[in-house]
Image: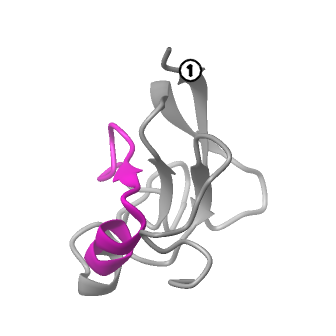
Amino acid sequence: MGRTCGPGDQRPGPVLVVGDLNTVPWDNAAKHFNMVTSLAWGPHPLSPTWPSIAGLSLIPLDHMLTSPGLCILDPRTFIIPGSDHQGLSATIAVNR
């Protein structure tokens, strides 16, 4: 990943990464990823999404990260029937 998302890579525009990253923001690997890619955690990186049991979750494993130029608005979690993770939803705005 360092090769395709490294600091010297040219990106055609803003970058949004969303999903189950199986890490927490305070983990050393997550901190290293942020440092190497310059991506920033969304506005609520500590929102718990796993395990989703009866609508309650304990650990933030699912995340939204953005490059400069994007803004995450109105982030929220929601229940996904049959999944052990809660989903993430947000409006993404492009800064001009």
Q: Quadrant of residue 32?
A: bottom left
Q: Residue at x 29, y 66 (%)?
A: 25
For the N terminus, the image quarter is bottom right
| 39 shown above or below 66 | below
- Most extreme residue toward the top, as rendered? 96
**For this rendering, which residue is in front, 12 or 70?**
12
- Residue 38 is left or right of residue 31, and the answer is right
**For this rendering, which residue is in front, 69 or 11?**
11
Where is residue 90 drawn, in percent x and y? 58, 29
**For this rendering, which residue is in front, 68 or 66?**
68
Where is residue 43 drawn, in percent x and y? 33, 37
Q: Residue at x 45, y 67 (%)?
A: 61
Where is residue 85 drawn, in percent x and y? 60, 62
Res 86 visible: no
Answer few, some or many: residues within 10 Å of disc 1's Cα (few below 14, many 20 plus, some between 14 and 19).
few
Res 60 visible: yes
- Residue 75 is left or right of residue 43, and the answer is right
Amino acid type of disc 1? Ala
Q: Quadrant of residue 30?
A: bottom left
Which contiguous range is marked in magenta?
Answer: 31-47
Q: Residue at x 62, y 60 (%)?
A: 19
Where is residue 3 drawn, in percent x and y? 57, 84
Q: Residue at x 55, y 71 (%)?
A: 5
**Does the segment drawn in magenta span residue 32?**
yes
SS at badge 1: strand
Where does label 1 land, which residue? 93
| 72 shown above or below 55 | above
